Amino acid sequence: MSSLVPPFTLETATSKVRLAEDGWNSRDPERVSLVYTPDSRWRNRAEFITGRVEIVAFLTRKWAKELDYRLIKEIWAFTDNRIAVRFAYEWHDDSGNWFRSYGNENWEFDATGLMQRRFACINDLPIRETERKYHWPLGRRPDDHPGLTELGL
């Protein structure tokens, strides 16, 4: 496989998306922060985040609230140094209320393949526990688990 740096091909962009999904499913803020530039800029919903220190703080808060977090990402489009993805993740709060959060992200990478900009739009849909579609053990989604398209999401 070619290197995962821009300009992207369908193969490298798809691999980049899966690696991002795997990282986020680790729920390890320090590990996840290392794929972003030290001065990376985010818009996540209505929150603006700059740099790895703020990324770690944000993800630490996120995963303290969004329990049993499981995520699937899917490539939507790519060009040169940008990738667009759609995603859905399931989680519950500390009262046992389940949600499926849907969204889109636009990513921009530097020449070394680190993400320098991330713009995320996300909506939360309350679901019943019986409506969950993600049942793999916490961590990386198994290779044979259906993706968003296959799940009808």
Image (tube, helix red, strand yellow):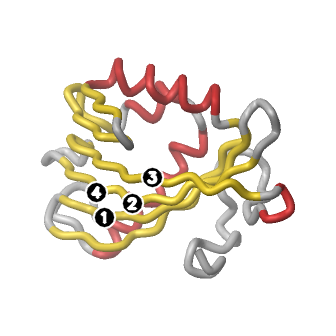
Q: For the residues carrying marks 3 and 1, which lies nearer the camera in this image?
A: 3
The image shows residue 82 at horizontal and vertical percentages of: 20, 60
Compare marks 2 and 3 and give the one earlier in the sequence. 2
From the image, tell me which residue sits under label 1: 84
Asked whether, in this view, residue 59 is left or right of residue 44, the answer is right
Question: Residue most toward the front?
Answer: 126
Q: Amino acid at mark 1?
A: Ala
Viewer-proximal residue, 131 or 16? 131
Mark 2 touches mark 3? (CB < 8 Å): no
Q: Amino acid at mark 2?
A: Asn
From the image, tell me which residue sits under label 3: 122
From the image, tell me which residue sits under label 4: 106
Q: Amino acid at mark 3?
A: Ile
The image shows residue 39 at horizontal and vertical percentages of: 20, 27
Q: Residue at x 69, y 46 (%)?
A: 91
Asked whether, in this view, residue 7 is left or right of residue 149, the answer is left
Q: Residue at x 32, y 66 (%)?
A: 12
Secondary structure of residue under mark 3: strand
Mark 4 touches mark 3? (CB < 8 Å): no
Mark 3 touches mark 1? (CB < 8 Å): no
Mark 2 touches mark 4? (CB < 8 Å): yes
Secondary structure of residue under mark 4: strand
From the image, tell me which residue sits under label 2: 104
Compare marks 4 and 1 and give the one earlier in the sequence. 1
Q: Amino acid at mark 4?
A: Asn
Q: In the figure, 65 relative to 142: above or below?
A: above
Q: For the residues carrying marks 1 and 2, which lies nearer the camera in this image?
A: 2
